[in-house]
C-alpha cells in the first residue's frame, strides 16, 4: 500500500535520517564504489524542496492453497 501524505518539512527531515549516510556519501564500505542512485539522491537531498511525502507499506500474505486430501 502506498500513502501520499501532505508535504511537511518533518517528512523531508525524517527521510534524511533513514538513508544510510555511508552509502550516500561514499564512506566506509562504500568508499571505493560509485552508485548513480546515491549520487542522484544526494543531489536531491541538497535541494530542500520538502516534497518527501510518500509512505509505502509492504505486507506478506501467504497464498499457498490448503491441501485437499480425501
Image: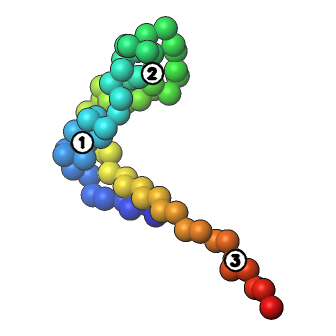
Instruction: Report whether residue 4 is seen.
Output: yes
Determine the residue positioned at 45% across, 21% down: 39
Left or right: where 19 falls relative to 64:
left
Per the rendering, the mark at residue 22 is none
Residues under numbered marks 3 and 2 in contact, where contact means CB atoms less than 8 Å apart: no
Instruction: Report whether residue 49 is seen.
Output: no
Screen quadrant of the C terminus: bottom right
Residue 44 image-quadrant placement: top left
Q: Nearer the viewer, mark 3 or mark 2?
A: 3
In this view, 66 is above or below 56: below
Real-space Cα distance between discs 1 and 2? 19 Å
Real-space Cα distance between discs 3 and 2? 44 Å
Determine the residue positioned at 47% across, 58% down: 58
Q: Position of residue 67 (x, y in %)?
A: 73, 80
Which residue is situated farthest in the left direction here? 10
Per the rendering, the mark at residue 65 is 3
Determine the residue positioned at 49% across, 8% down: 32
Reading the chain from its start, which is encountered first: label 1 or label 3?
Answer: 1
**Residue corresponding to mark 2:** 39
Q: Nearer the viewer, mark 1 or mark 2?
A: 1
Q: Label 2's element?
A: helix
Q: Position of residue 17 (x, y in %)?
A: 26, 35
Instruction: Rate crowding at label 3 as few (under 14), some (14 to 19) or many (20 or more) other CA atoms within 10 Å.
Output: few
Per the rendering, the mark at residue 14 is 1
Instruction: Rate crowding at label 2 as few (under 14), some (14 to 19) or many (20 or more) other CA atoms within 10 Å.
Output: some
Amino acid at each position: 500500500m502506498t500513502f501520499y501524505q501532505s508535504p511537511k518539512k518533518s517528512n523531508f527531515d525524517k527521510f534524511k535520517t533513514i538513508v544510510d549516510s555511508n552509502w550516500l556519501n561514499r564512506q566506509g564500505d562504500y568508499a571505493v564504489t560509485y552508485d548513480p542512485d546515491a549520487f542522484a539522491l544526494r543531489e536531491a537531498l541538497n535541494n530542500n524542496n520538502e516534497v518527501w511525502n510518500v509512505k509505502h507499506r509492504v505486507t506478506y500474505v501467504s497464498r499457498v492453497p490448503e491441501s485437499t486430501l480425501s
